[in-house]
Image (cartoon, rainbow, N blue to C red):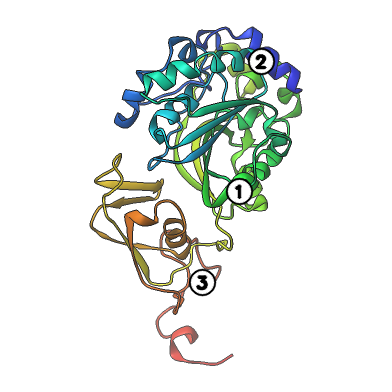
Amino acid sequence: MTHESVKEYYGETLQSSADLQTNACCTAGDVPAHLKDVLGKIHDEVLAKYYGCGLIAPVALKGARILDLGSGSGRDVYALAGLVGESGHVVGVDMTDAQLDVARAHQDYHAQAFGYARPNTEFHKGYIEKLDELPLDAGTFDIIVSNCVLNLAMDKEAVLRGAYNLLKPGGEMYFSDVYADRRMPQELVNDKVLYGECLSGALYWNDFENMARRVGFHDPRLVEDRVLTIENREIEAKVGNIGFTSATYRLLKIDGLEPACEDYGQAVVYKGTIAECPNTFTLDKHHEIEAGKVFPVCGNTYRMLNESRFAAHFEFIGNWDTHYGLFGDCGGETPFDGPVEGDAATSGSCC
């Protein structure tokens, strides 16, 4: 598979989202309330050329500097532009001229729609595997998003490495993509339609998480996921028993996160001050934090909240003085059998 074949599929073969042959690149679920207003202001042509697999809009974005990898027609760039406000800035990167032409044609339109004096968006042509070749400074982005694009990349680890370098300390990569339940056979990877439909380029989920750790995102957090049903008999026959999932991950750039969730007796209290989620803040699939309630957390979660843009919205309880082992229901399991009452583990017998 090559960049040229992907550009041909998205620049020429697909003329609108109706031309997709599967539902892998289609959004499911309700639109969050805080997105409905901005989506209603996006130009019809931009929406028609949208091929993403999720709504990439984390919360607490006011004033943020955001980069969208594989921005396509600009739908997510413009949605985010409406959320960051006039003081924020959103940059899109894409390799397809046809998509970039659509996106750039509507910059003034969206600035006017959002009531801004000038556009707070920009678009660059380039490969997301080669972010270091673009006029983007390292360590300058608060958030990097990507919408069903990592699977299309030829070198996925290079994408993650480039994103890590461009983020500020405490910044996050928040993105949706398609994942497989096993490694993809090469004959499927070479199928242009399957690759273009976001299926045969999908990473095995465990390879993805290990890849993220290698580049510096030491504790990948799954935010949400849904099983993909292809709904195309010919393509279903090609992929056989391979299962696919559309998933949103949050990768935070925080040095020194531990490989497991460790317990230091810490807790947080969510203040309820993020406008989009006044009652409950969701860090990931396993951390839905109710406002006003003391919520025990592992050391990694404590740092993710304390060393990111979320810090102002939390109270932090505890320190690092005492370690209590693995954090229950989060940090995995000890490799040792548990003690039985009266045996050596509880009777004080020596080795």
In the rendered image of this protein, does residue 110 appear above or below residue 285? above
61 sits left or right of 33 in the view: right
| Distance from Cα at disc 3 to Cα at disc 1 | 45 Å
Give percent across and percent down for residue 268.
33, 62
Label 2 is placed on what type of residue?
A: Asp
Q: Is residue 201 above or below residue 167?
A: above
Q: Are marks 3 and 2 in contact (CB under 8 Å)?
A: no
Number of numbered markers: 3
Q: Residues within 10 Å of mark 1 (few under 14, many from 20)?
A: some
Instruction: Give the labeled residue for mark 2.
Output: 97
x then y, percent, for residue 179: 57, 34
Task: Identify the residue position indicated by label 1 in the image.
Answer: 139
Q: Secondary structure at mark 1?
A: loop
**Quarter where residue 327 is shown:** bottom left
The disc labelled 1 sits on which kind of residue?
Answer: Gly
Upstream in sequence: badge 1 or badge 2 = 2
